[in-house]
Amino acid sequence: MTDGSSLTLESSVAAIDPRVANRRTGFRTKGPPAHDVLAESFGIGTVGQLLRHYPRRYIDRSATVPVGELRFRQGQQVTVIGRVKRVDRRVTRRRQSMVTVKLYDGTGTLDLVFFNQPWTAGTYREGIELAVSGLAAVYRGRLQLANQEVEVLRGDEAEKVHTGRITPVHSAAEGISTRTIRELVYRSLERLPVIDDPLPREIVADEALEPEDAALRAIHFPEDPSSLEQARDRLKFDELFALELGVAYRKRRVERTEKGVVHVSEGDLTRAYLAALPFDLTEAQQRAIKEVGEDLAARRPMNRLLQGDVGSGKTVVALYAALAAVQSGHQATIMAPTEVLAGQHSRTARMLMASVGGRDLVSSPARRPADDQPTLLDGLAAEERENGEAVTFALLTASTTGKDRQRVLEGIREGTVDLVIGTHALVQEGVEFADLTVAVIDEQHRFGVHQRVVLKEKGVHPDVLIMTATPIPRTLALTYYGDLDVSTLDEMPAGRRPVATTVVRTPAERTQAYERVREEVAAGRQAFVVCAAIDEANRLEVRAAEKEAERLAKDVFPDLRLELLHGRMRPAEKEAVMDRFRAGAADVLISTTVIEVGVDVPNATVMLVENAERFGLAQLHQLRGRIGRGNHPSYCILFDESHPDNSEARARLEAITRTTDGFELADEDLRLRGEGTLFDVRQSGMPDLKLARLAEDADLVRRARTRAFAAVDADPGLDRHPELLDLLRQSFSGEAIEWLFHS
Ligand code: ADP
Ligand code: MG
C-alpha cells in the first residue's frame, strides 16, 4: 500500500504515487516524468481529468489457466500465475540481451523470454510470484505467451492491475505507456475516498443508474462485462444530461427573459398570399406554417429550425413568416449564405408574392421609364397597392451598387422596404432596420447562432426562423440543437419523381452514362457534370473542372453546347453562365461544387459526378437535389474511383443509391462517420461526448433530455440547485458559455 493519505479529484497527478507518477519513461532513465508527459500530451493535470481519460478498449485477461492446459488454448488470451523457478541470461548472436524466466505453477513450466530488457533478470528473480497474460503459443516445442504482460504479485498484497482481470487499455503517447497510465489510474482510485455524485439523488434513483463512484471505478477496472456496461451507461448519461441541461436552461432563459413581438399571424396579407399560391401546400408545409404562425403570434420569441430537403418548399414558409411581420406593421429579412441563393430567394419571392402586390424596390415599375410595357404583374401590384396591401421587397447583395444600393439602404432605414433579401454578411454589416421583427436565416448546410447574436448586438430581437436543407438526425436535433423548436418538411410537393441513382465503375458503364446525357439532351433536357474538390484551396478543383470541360468538349460532346462554372469566377460571370444555362442556351454545365446550393433548373435531368467517392453523404444528397425538380424522370450517375477495399466509401455510395430520403441519409452519415466529423458542433465549447454515441444512444438521449427539462422547469434559474449550475459551468466553456448564460 502507499502512504494511505487520500486524494481528491483536484489533486495533481504528481501526487498519486511518486513511484509511478515520477517514473521516468522510455528506458526508465530518460525522458520527463510520467505526470509531465500526461499534461503535455493529453492536457491531464488532475486526478479528476485522469479518470475521464477512459480506456480505449479492454483485454480480457481474467481467465487464469494452469500451464499444463496451455497447449490446448493456443491463440487464446490467457493468464497464468506461478513462481519463478530459474532465470537465465545470455547474449544472442545478434548481440541482443536475452533473459529467459522459467515460471512453474505445479502443472507445468512456461518460458518467458525478454529481449533487450536486461533489467528483467533483476525484477523477476527466483521465488517471486508472477501473473502473466498473453496469447497462448508454442514456439519450437516450448510453451510461451505472445504479447505477454507481466506483473509481480507481492506477498499478501497480490493485487492484479495489469493481468488476471479485464484489463483497460488507455490511449498512450510518446513517452508514456498504457501500462503506466493504467497504474496511475489504479493508484489514484485506490487512494480516492468515495467520489461524489454530480447528479441529484432522485435522478440517480429514478433512472436506476449506477452510483458515480462505482461507475468511475468500473469503467477503468470492471469486474465483468455486465458491470462495465452499467458503468458506461451511467457515464454516458452524465454526458448527455449535462448537454441537455444546458440546452434546457438556455431555452427557458431565452423564453423567459426576451420579449418577442406579438404578430398577427392570420391577416389579409397572409390569407391572400396562401390563397393565391399556384399549388396546393403539402401537409408538411401546412403543419410548418401553423407552427411558425403560433410562434409569431406568441409573446415569447420564436427560435425555430425549419428543416427540409432541397425542393421541399421551405421558401414558401419563409415568405409566410415575412408577410406576417409586414401585415403586423413591421419588417422582415431573409438571409442566405451565398449571392446565388439570395438571388434564388428573391426570384421565388417575386413570383409567389405577385398576388399580394409584391414589388421589388429596385426593378419596380415606378422607377422604369414610362414607355416600358406594363406587365400583368405590374398591373396587379398597382391594384393591390391601392388597397394598401403592397409589399415592397429588396435584394441586397454585393452586386447591389451605386444608386440602387443607396435607395435600398434608405428604404430599409425608413421602413419603406418591408422585406430585405440578402446575404448573411450584408445584412450584418452596414444595414439599419427601421423595425425588424422577423429574421429568416437560411443556413443551407452549416449553421450557428452567429447571425442571431449579431442581430441582437444591433439591438434587434426578432423572431428567428433558421432554415436548413441538411436534415439533422433526430438525436442531433434533440442534443446540440435541442434549444430550438423544430418544424420538418418531410414530404415533397406532388409530382416530384425520385431521382434514379447509379454507381459507375467500368469504362463501358462510363460510355453508357455519356449516352444517357446525349439521349436527354436530344429530348430537350439538360445535364450537370460535377467535379470533386481535390485540395483545400479549391485550386485543383478548378483545374479539374477546366480540364474536364476541355476533354468533354473535344472528345465526348463536340456537338453539344457546354458551359463551365467554378468558384474562382467573378459573381457577374457566374450569374451570366447560370442565366444562359437556365435559359436553355447550354446543354451541359460542367462545374465544381458551387452548384451545390441555389441552382434551380427544372429542365436539368442528368447529373454526372466525377470522383463521387470524395464527397460526403450530405454533399452528394445536396448535389442530387439539383435534379428531379421538374416533371421528367431524372438520373444521377456517380463515378466511383475508390479502391475496392475502401469500405466506408462503398457504404456511402451504397446508401445514396438506396434512398433519396434525406433523414435516412443523415442517420446513415452519423452512423458511418460519427458526430464529430459531419457537423460542426454549433459553437465551440459545447460539451464533447466521450462515451455517448448519438447514432446508438437514442434511448439515453431521450431519458437525459426528459430529466434535464424536468429539472429546469422545476427551478428555471437553477437557484435552488447550485450543484447543477456548477455542472453547467464545468461542462460548457468558451463561446458556449456566452450562448448559455448571455446571448
Ligand atoms: P426549398 O427552399 O425547400 O429548396 P423551395 O421553397 O425553393 O424549396 O421550393 C422549390 C420549388 O417548389 C419552388 O419552385 C416552389 O415554388 C415549388 N413549390 C413549393 N411548394 C410547393 C408545393 N406544395 N407544390 C408544388 N410546388 C411547390
Ligand atoms: Mg429554396
Image (cartoon, helix red, strand yellow):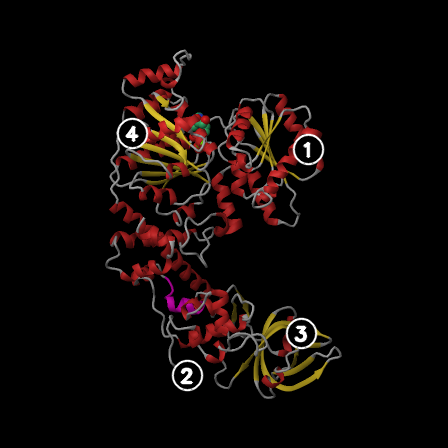
Q: Residues within 10 Å of mark 1 (few under 14, many from 20)?
A: few
Indicate which disc residue 551 carries. 1
- Pinpoint residue 10: horizontal percent, then vertical percent: 37, 70
- What residue sits right under mark 3 in the picture? 71
Between marks 2 and 3 in the image, the one whose residue lies nearer the viewer: 2
Q: Residues within 10 Å of mark 4 (few under 14, many from 20)?
A: some
Is the residue 668 above or below the residue 558 in the image?
below
Give residue 65's quadrant in the image: bottom right
Label 2 – label 1 distance at C-alpha = 77 Å
Label 4 – label 3 distance at C-alpha = 89 Å
For residue 561: magenta? no
Where disc 3 sits, the SS reads helix
Q: Quadrant of the N terminus?
A: bottom left
Taking the view exactly as shown, the residue that stands out farthest to the bottom is: 127
- Pinpoint residue 267: horizontal percent, then vertical percent: 27, 26
Where disc 2 sits, the SS reads loop
Question: Tags 2 and 1 in contact by the CB under 8 Å rule?
Answer: no
Label 2 – label 3 distance at C-alpha = 43 Å
Where disc 1 sits, the SS reads helix
Judging depth in this view, the residue of 653 and 135 nearest the camera is 653
- What residue sits right under mark 2 in the picture? 3
Label 3 – label 1 distance at C-alpha = 65 Å
Q: Is residue 493 visible?
A: no
Answer with the quadrant where ligand 2 appears in the image: top left
Between marks 4 and 3 in the image, the one whose residue lies nearer the viewer: 4
